Image (cartoon, helix red, strand yellow):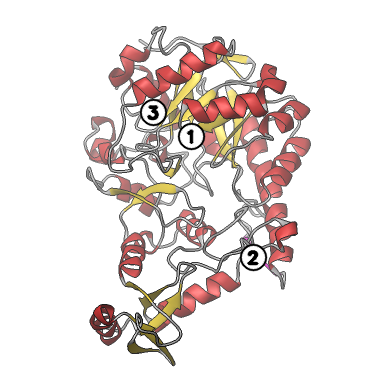
Amino acid sequence: MSLLEPLMMSGKEVLPLVEGGKGISATNGISAGAWAAAGGVGTVSCVNADSFDGQGNVIPQIYHGKTRIERHQELIEYAINGGLTQVRDAHDLAGGQGRIHINVLWEMGGAEAILEGVLTKAKGLVHGVTCGAGMPYKLSEIAAKHEVFYHPIISSARAFGILWKRAYKKHGDWLGSVVYEDPWLAGGHNGLTNAEDPREPQDPYPRVAALRTMMNKFGLQHVPIIMAGGVWYLRDWTNWLNNPEIGLIAFQYGTRPLLTKESPIPKIWKDALTTLKEGDILLHRFSPTGFYSSAVKTRFLRELQGRSDRQVTFSGKQTEEFSAEIQAGKRKYFVQPEDKPKADLWIADGFSEALKTPDGTLVFDTPAQALDIRKDQKDCMGCLSQCKFSNWSQNEDANYSTGRGADPRSFCIQKTLMDISHGGALEDNLMFAGHAAFNFSTDPFFSNGFVPTVKELFERILTGD
């Protein structure tokens, strides 16, 4: 027996279960097509999606341009070709069932060009666009132009109110849903604001109820809200169903479908999911986007934490405040006397390279790691609209620069997500996951190494378990 009743989503009546679009190559045409075929909404990630050669092998996304601008154009071409490939796969596998959405990040490099490219070439194959990671004011305009529904991802009623008043009300007929992505529970990038404490999670119910109240004031009672982040067992959400304070509601699953036969992530990633424990997911702010994000505590994240901990303020010249001299690599710096013992100890422990940050500090790392950081910064291909790691900005008027120095406390997100999704070592990469991922180890459905098909998982979810 299903706990959910069908509702209208992107122009068709479907079961209100939505596949979360999980960034680079973690959701593709096969997983999205299977989810739609089961009667829900499948989501193709159009964030640097994979293309294939004539033998079915993934085409490596190698950049040949000598400048960041040239590499940025290559990235956009890869993304459009890959998105089109995956959308076609999803459409074919769905067999006319469910709905097919594409997911993009507004702050990804070339977001508008990629959206335009995919929607133009995949006309009739895409029913909706899900978009978050920023304030996507132009999303409604682009969606309406291509006659597809748009599904903005927000984390507060206030954010949606701003989007509606400034842009979305002009194209209200194409608003397919509003995705509330809980900033303390969802995997990947999160919409925490400076007014919210990352260490004090808030109950999503009053926040979603406030969103519904605002939507009702705008005459949007007929538009569903999609609850995203922390959703595992539907039985835990029964008080949200047929509840006038919440209204029409659907549920998005991002983490749980990772462990299915159709999921494109490597087997080592799938196996690792079953070993996670509560507390193994870290909400951190190392992302080059500047947003908070949630990921598994791997060696990669621990190294980023260590790098930031090995940090002192400095001066290039000796002053009364910065009077203590240190030697890091081939250069001399001046630090405050109380910081010199720490710096000397880090250098003695092998963290002998000092890297400047845009905040007037030095961070200390090994020579090998410092070399990798500088290379990654040099190889930047503009995968974000602006990147604090490399100081790239796609704003031509700003000379393609954020106006700040490159920040070695962050990392190249394109490099690590491409690597982990194509079989790279888990401990050496960023491994996104929602905070409910520890349930894999206790959920009886996944016991004894069982990996379901998407259809089997979909049917299980509908029972409430």
Quadrant of residue 311 in the image? Answer: bottom left
The range drawn in magenta is: 60-64
Secondary structure under badge 3? helix
Mark 1 and mark 2 residues within 8 Å of each other at the beta carbon: no
**Residue 412 in magenta stretch:** no
Residue 457 marker: 3
Give the spatial CA distance, label 3 vs label 2.
Answer: 36 Å
Residue 313 image position (x, y, % from top left):
37, 74
Give the spatial CA distance, label 3 vs label 1.
Answer: 14 Å
Give the spatial CA distance, label 1 vs label 2.
Answer: 27 Å
Q: Amino acid at mark 3?
A: Leu
Residue 94: tell me if it is visible: no
Q: Earlier in the sequence, mark 3 or mark 1?
A: 1
Q: Which residue is mark 2?
A: 62
Residue 20 marker: 1
Q: Which is nearer the eye, 455 or 294?
A: 294
Considering the image in quadrants, where does the C terminus appear? Answer: top left
Residue at x-position 45% and y-position 16%: 249
- Magenta part, dominant SS: loop
Q: Amino acid at mark 2?
A: Ile
Q: Earlier in the sequence, mark 1 or mark 2?
A: 1
